[in-house]
Image (cartoon, helix red, strand yellow):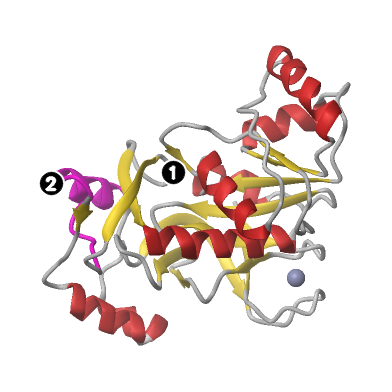
Amino acid sequence: MLAAANKDAAALRDCLRGGVAGLSGVPILSGAAFAEAVEAQPPFGRFALAAEDLIRAGLATAAVPRPTPIAWSRADLDREAALGARLLARAGLRARSRTSDTLDGGLVAPGTLAVSDALEALDALALPVGPITGDAALKRATEVWEIVHPEAILCDPASLRFLRDASGYPRPRAYVVLLTPDDAAGLAAPPADDVFRILSLPQVNTWIAGECAAHDGLHLSDDAVLAEVVDGRLVLSPRQRTIAPLRYDSGLTATIDTATCACGEKSPRLRFGN
Ligand SMILES: [Zn+2]
């Protein structure tokens, strides 16, 4: 078990308590600076805000110049599972819903582990099948989908593109796609009734924002993530995380809409541009 602490952590926690205004003195962190800081101070850089034991590690691959190790504590994972359950519920999933996911099973985050944790918190059925970008993988998945009939498929962007064009498998009611800042075009694209987009930046939070049935922007998980738009770009900070890179520059062009959504939710919604 690896415990983490930082001499500046108390000061940074104070900044976080002040919300977006409190963060104004904290420099904006580029993905390149994040990767360099982690390399300079292995294994996870100088970003520890708490001294909790870290129990899961993975590789951030989005909004960084090269794969960079990140980690979660038990409390981090519990909070992310609850958040993920809320985002999946917003996409129409319920307890006992049957789902299947195509996410990476290895180190890369967001992966199938995060999705399984969220589905467990929702009491929904998870069936990981791995990425599907070819006929052989689709045939293998179809054999089990014909038995389980998932109502939703949780997928990575490449599998979503392949599956929406493919046929010969039981089509789900909904596709839930986890998009990172590396998929700016997918985030900015017009909405589709059967696709629920989720913004994921695992070094900040796996479940940053997600689309509802109104498909009019992505609802921000504002109790877990602070979002600012600085010079037109979306800057994100985890409110509570053991390893917490603050004011992370997502590189995404975005606006924040604070009006109440047609779905009735009051959480701010993110809209993305190209
Ligand atoms: Zn809504």
Label 1: few (<14), some or many (≥20) within 10 Å?
many
Left or right, residue 216 beside residue 39: right
Viewer-side residue, 166 vs 53: 53
Given the current orientation, which residue lies at the most extreme top position? 136
Asked whether mark 2 lies closer than 8 Å to ligand 1, one says no
Q: Amino acid at mark 2?
A: Ala
Tag of residue 40: 2
User: Which quarter is ligand 1 in?
Assistant: bottom right
Q: Is residue 188 above or below residue 113?
A: below
Residue stretch in magenta:
31-49
- What is the x, y in percent for residue 147? 84, 28
The location of residue 186, given as percent across then percent down, is 65, 45
Front one among 247 and 138: 138
> Are the two marked residues, 2 and 1, in contact with CB atoms closer than 8 angstroms?
no
Which residue is depicted at the point 33% across and 85% down? Answer: 22
Mark number displayed over residue 62: 1
**Residue 70 sits inside the magenta stretch:** no
Residue at position x 35%, y 85% in the image: 17
From the viewer's side, name the closer residue of 232 and 123.
123
| 88 to the left or right of 170 | left
Q: Residue 37 placed where, x, y %? A: 19, 51
Identified at 83% across, 48% down, the residue is 194
Q: Secondary structure at mark 1?
A: loop
Queried whether the magenta region covers residue 32, the answer comes back as: yes
Task: Name the mark on residue 217.
Answer: none
What is the quadrant of residue 46 in the picture?
Answer: bottom left
Residue 55, position in %: x, y? Answer: 33, 50
**Which amino acid lies under the numbered mark 1 shown in the image of this protein?**
Ala
Label 2, secondary structure: give it: helix
